[in-house]
Amino acid sequence: MLEVKDLTIRYGNFTAVEGLSFSVEEGQWLMLVGPNGAGKSTVLSAIAQTTPYSGEIYFQGEPLRSMKSDLRASRIGILAQNHFVGYSFSVEEVIRLGRYSHTRGFLAEKRTDNEAAVAQALELTGMTGQRHQSVLTLSGGELQRTFLAQVLAQDPQLLLLDEPTNHLDLVYQKQVFSLIREWLQRPERAVISVVHDLSLAKAYGSHAILLDRGRTVSSGRLKEVMTAEHLNQVYRMDVAEWMKKLLSEWDRTASR
């Protein structure tokens, strides 16, 4: 579905990503993991065509550089880590923007499938009750769910998610990741996520790329990438020991 060849991204003399190559197949959930400054979000920006790069990125065999923007928007959905809104659109209006690439003309009549997609996205993200509320009045978590609903209404084939549960409490973290896993079960779909929480990566990912300072340390099936050897090398600490210590705190709490 997606093929990246020798992706390199430079800002002046600084190389953010160097010589990255990978592919994503239908049904895969690829996790981009690594410490801060590893280049994870920068890779997503290149795929989204918002960051200049050298190398090649293909979607279903077609270079993304030459793909028309409306066609790209109908196939690739992007959920950013942070959202700035300076307009008083309602939740429903923001979500409906996700259907723009499926509508011929900005003033086109409402289509039944568009309205159904918006209603389903509202329900899936738990935002039906706020559909007429201004996005300027939403909490950070509600705003994130609104933009997730916009991406789901877009009905893309590939989802690019940059810390998709940023600002969300535990209930909605679980809901969002479970929702994305369910979305992925349909044909011709794939997901690429940037995640800092290694537990979430292990729980939901099928494949992973471990990055460090813009370079690939390991890539492939998740269980082959997220080994103690690889993680300790990148994070410069005993990751498994730290995770076990955190888990032991919960075990103590449960036994009280």
Image (cartoon, helix red, strand yellow):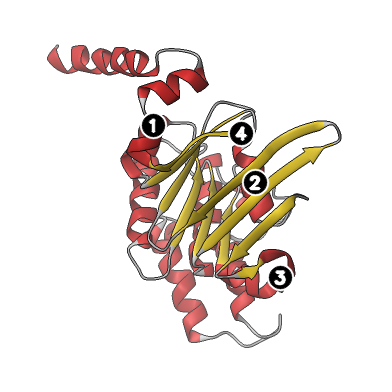
The residue under the point 32% across, 63% down is 185
Instruction: Give neighbour class at mark 3: few <14, some 14-19, many 20+ (Cα, 10 Å).
Output: few
Which label belongs to residue 215? 4
Residue 28 versus residue 35 in the image, above or below: below
Q: Of the residues tagged 1 and 2, which is closer to the observer?
A: 1
Q: Of the residues tagged 4 and 2, which is closer to the observer?
A: 4
Whole-Å distance between the Cαs marked 1 and 4? Answer: 16 Å
Instruction: Give neighbour class at mark 2: few <14, some 14-19, many 20+ (Cα, 10 Å).
Output: few
Q: Of the residues tagged 3 and 4, which is closer to the observer?
A: 4
Whole-Å distance between the Cαs marked 3 and 4? Answer: 29 Å
- The numbered mark, 1 or 2, whose residue comes first in the sequence reads 2
The residue under the point 49% across, 67% down is 157
Residue ranking furthest to the left: 255
Question: Which residue is label 3 attached to?
Answer: 69
Q: Amino acid at mark 3?
A: Ser
Question: Which residue is label 2 attached to?
Answer: 83
- The numbered mark, 1 or 4, whose residue comes first in the sequence reads 4
Question: Which residue is label 1 attached to?
Answer: 226
Q: Are marks 3 and 4 in contact (CB under 8 Å)?
A: no
Q: Is residue 118 left or right of residue 58?
A: left
Whole-Å distance between the Cαs marked 4 and 2? Answer: 28 Å
Identify which residue, 18 or 177, lies in the foreground.
Answer: 18
- The numbered mark, 3 or 4, whose residue comes first in the sequence reads 3
Find numbered disc 3 in the image and state the secondary structure of the residue it sits on: helix
Is any atom of residue 162 visible in this view?
yes
- The numbered mark, 4 or 2, whose residue comes first in the sequence reads 2
Q: Amino acid at mark 4?
A: Arg
Whole-Å distance between the Cαs marked 3 and 2? Answer: 21 Å
Q: Position of residue 48 (x, y in %)?
A: 66, 56
